[in-house]
Amino acid sequence: MINSSNIKNESVRKVVEDGKLHIFDHPLIQHKLTLMRDKKTGSKDFRTLLTEISLLMGYEVSRDLPLHDVEIETPICKTIGKQIDGKKVALIPILRAGLGMIEGLLSLIPVAKIGHIGLYRDEKTHKPVVYYCKLPEDIQQRNVIVTDPMLATGGSSVDAITMLKERGCQHIRLMCLVAAPEGILKVHEAHPDVKIYVAAVDEKLNENAYIVPGLGDAGDRIFGTK
Ligand code: PRP
Ligand code: URA
């Protein structure tokens, strides 16, 4: 995790110190993120890199998942081992771009259930508009990991988390790739219980509420729609 004294924004630094923001400084993640930011990187490589980073982030995001004891037999004797309550995890991508983080997480937690929340940002107001929500039936009993590569104004993540809480979810983490300080602070203010994981805290938002320097439109770059 990044040393909080390296974070320029004082309010964001406090969120790190509160233990509610984890910023990954692992060299593999930083290297791959630089490749993703490069506008010359095409959709195929962009998707692969996002999957690889998601897997690396998933190691930390899943650190405090509950374990239970299981009895097994080694070639030598019976023993008690630990097993993750993998069936109790739900991955919730915010459509579209959040989908790009699911494959990497599934390779770590293959039995996780997947729900989908469809939100798009209105181009003029930059406010999120809901168009889809389909969640596992027992979502309120699950440890939820919400995925979205971009945390810009924070509106989409705040609304997605609110929708999950309205359906009874209590254990929610938010996994993003690039965040603006504005987005981190908005999520933390609305949902102080939710731990946020990011690979980078960028400088600011521009007049179109895009992250600067950012990586552009994540959905378009993943799916090649522009
Ligand atoms: C992008 C991104 C986030 C949202 C972030 O989605 O994937 O969901 O914007 O912005 P915010 O923090 O200001 O809400 P977009 O609305 O472009 O939809 P898409 O994933 O379908 O392209
Ligand atoms: N959505 C994106 O895909 N990128 C941004 O920089 C902001 C919102």
Image (spheres, rainbow, N blue to C red):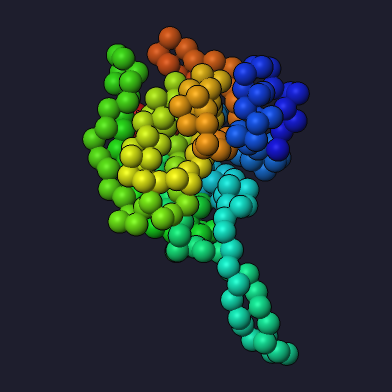
Q: Which residue: 61% across, 39% down?
A: 32
Q: Is residue 23 visible?
A: no
Quarter in which the N terminus is drawn? top right
Q: Is residue 14 left or right of residue 116?
A: right
Q: Which residue: 47% across, 52% down?
A: 143
Quadrant assignment, res 113? bottom left
Q: Is residue 155 visible?
A: yes
Quarter in which the C terminus is drawn? top left
Q: Nearer the viewer, residue 181 or 84?
A: 84
> Percent x, y for residue 135?
31, 50
Q: Which residue: 48% across, 35% down?
A: 149
Above or below 181: residue 60:
below
Quadrant assignment, res 153? top left
Q: Which residue: 45% across, 63% down?
A: 87
> Percent x, y for residue 197?
57, 38
Q: Which residue sits furthest left? A: 131
> Percent x, y for residue 165?
38, 40
Above or below 9: residue 74:
below
Q: Which residue sits furthest top? A: 207
Above or below 87: residue 166:
above
